Amino acid sequence: MTISSSSEDMRGLLLRAFGFASFRANQEAVCRAAIDGRDALLVMPTGAGKSLCYQLPAIAREGTTLVISPLIALMEDQASKLEALGFAVARIHSGMDRAASREACVAYLNGSLQFLFIAPERFRVPGFAEMLAKRKPSLVAIDEAHCISQWGHDFRPDYRTLGQHLPALRPAPVIALTATATPIVQDDIVKQLALRDAERFIHGFRRENLAVEVVEVAKSRRARFAGEVLGDPERRPAIVYAPTRRDAESLAAELSAVFPAAAYHAGLEPAVRERVQRAFLEGRLDAVVATIAFGMGIDKADVRTVIHTALPSSLEAYYQEIGRAGRDGKQSRTVLMYSYADKRTHEFFLERDYPPAPELDRLCRKLQGGPQHVEDLRQSLCTGKSAMDADTFAKALEKLLIHGGASMDYTEEVTLGHKQWRDAYAAQTVRRRAQIDMVVRFAESKQCRMGALVRHFGDVEEARTPCGHCDVCAPEACVAQRFREPSAQEREALQDVVKALRGGGAKSTGKLHKELFPRDEMARTEFEELLAGAAMAGIVELEEAGFEKDGRSIAYRKVSLTGEGEVFDVRTMRGMQLKDMSESVTQSARKDKRKRSSGGERSSQAARMSSSPKPSVAKAAAAPGPEAAALEEKLRVWRLAEAKEYGVPAFCIMGNSTMRELAMERPRTMDELIAVKGIGQAKAEKFGAAICRICAE
Ligand code: ADP
Ligand code: MG
């Protein structure tokens, strides 16, 4: 008896067949669509429980469900879980011998399977698709469906042809599943697979327990910085993503001097990789330093920190990678380090990975005489006069295959394809460039990080609520940010900014800079930092904007006054903080152990200005008691004396907010002192003894 899509029936099956008492968010609606025979596109983050969304309908609809999955490891994992539940499962992929594959095909044709897992490259084998079509499946599930889209970050040429084979497998509904698809990728999946009236389920991108932090750090300091962040055992286990294999190796070596750590990248023997992965899963390694190859399909719940030591190549990849933190629901942190140089690196790779069209033409010309084995093709192009280098050859061929300019069968014979590859290739290059621009904009943005990510994945409504944890919402709780007081020049500039914006609307920050500093009296980067500080203090609002020019999108920022900014007076301003790019982050490792504000709420200007950089009501409410106030006063007297002695203004000795912190925390030992926000190594050495003495009085 087939099972209907009534809640009762579905719940019964959920418990009986899968042992789950209730559906998770969204699962029921997706299952209903699939059981009722409708196509669906499901975009939910990793770990949300997507598999069940095809597995339950599979059982409800009876017959055999085909599951296309791009990675053998993922396939094996899912297949064996289903076997353990007692279902009839078979798989066909390149890791199996011929006899086993044949057996699977026979079982499929007999109708004795409930699930057949297939690797996409199987469709390259002549006759395979026809064989499948001999017996209609009752459901087709395409896992990791973003791999089908050339706009996706993980495009696989073998996924491209899937759309061609689906009509023969109809009328089965098709359900496409992925953890990562921006609206453009979603459209592309629907188009490529020719899904019919597909219902889209896009859900769950907000991660409540992740504090996303982005910090500008010079390349030379990143390794040390990563070590500092992870110095605190509570920040481990951790995954660190490094841009190159060499970086991964050297950072892993450095970290393993302090705690067990290992590198993981595609250049290692499979056995070594396997060992590292297992050791990490079993808790014998505290950190893995990986290139992008790590983590797909791994399920370790207690990862406390994910660090990126360089700007990731796309926001989709970034989101997936940070998503590996805090699967157990506990507070976790992600730290992304970047600098402007990272953008240049990505542009360099872009040029390397996307050879100019004339190089692709050279391959096409060689193929005009008829199909060639890939090795012969390489030989003829990569030797002799004006030889193509092997990397360019590989990239050029890959691009032709992706865009249909050539095709390759399973014996690696390459055949010339159609001529339309050119437009598609040009579009892909533009798209890749836009992806880089988007990560750069994300890193440089001054808006809630989680909000920006959620919006990126198409959930605009959900993006409006600030997360309360990130470096924009709760800078004081961050491990990687440092703050300082504005200089006299900066205060003056701020006054000018307020004046220029008063009564008017939003202005582009670039224009405003030119207007106020026509001769670059204040550098643009400093000006942007000042605006960021003003935004943090609630005086101005910054907004990312963009326009199209010559087919490229140009990003810029707009600044406007907030209601508070309209009545703001710099002369009565107290305690505004700017991000400090110069100081190191030596003692940051202990910082967020301290009590953290709940964050997220907006507070009055008064609260924000007097006790910033803590913009939340909760923290501002923790105003100093009489004892702390008395101590703060004592510290002020001491500071004034020091300032006189050094012949500098008082705030050069120590900022107001640091004084406030000291008064509240009352450190009595050097260790306690160094844990106070705003106290660096240098300050601790210079003034530590005096401060501890005053605090102990
Ligand atoms: P995804 O494919 O979205 O990354 P999975 O399908 O692998 O996630 O599911 C993640 C985990 O959640 C699995 O261990 C699965 O058994 C579990 N799970 C899925 N649905 C439920 C449910 N309704 N109740 C309890 N656990 C569930
Ligand atoms: Mg999955």
Image (cartoon, helix red, strand yellow):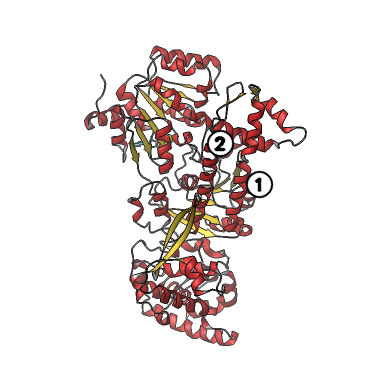
Determine which residue is flagged by label 1.
246
Q: Is residue 83 visible?
A: no
The kind of secondary structure element at disc 1 is helix
Instruction: Report the side of 301 relative to 202 (left or right).
Output: right
Instruction: Report the side of 137 relative to 69 (left or right).
Output: left
**Mark 1: few/some/many CA within 10 Å (<14, 14-19, 20+):** few
Whole-percent x, y for residue 612 in the image: 42, 71
Quadrant showing the N terminus = top left
The kind of secondary structure element at disc 2 is helix
Q: Which amino acid type is shown beneath numbered disc 1?
A: Arg
User: Eyeballing the image, is 49 above or below 169?
Assistant: below
Q: Which mark is residue 22?
A: none
Residue found at x 49% / y 30%: 160
Residue 653: quarter of image: bottom right
Residue 652: quarter of image: bottom right
Mark 1 or 2 closer to N-term?
Answer: 1
Query: Which quadrant of the frame does ligand 2 lie within?
Result: top left
Q: Which amino acid type is shown beneath numbered disc 2?
A: Arg
Distance from the alpha carbon under mark 1 to that under mark 2: 35 Å
Frontmost residue, 305 versus 242: 242
Which mark is nearer the camera, 1 or 2?
2
Q: Which mark is residue 422?
A: 2
Frontmost residue, 163 versus 619: 163
Say how many tags the image has.
Answer: 2
Whole-percent x, y for residue 561 in the image: 38, 70
Mark 2 sits near ligand 2, with its Cβ under 8 Å away: no
Whole-percent x, y for residue 537 in the image: 41, 70
**Mark 2: few/some/many CA within 10 Å (<14, 14-19, 20+):** some
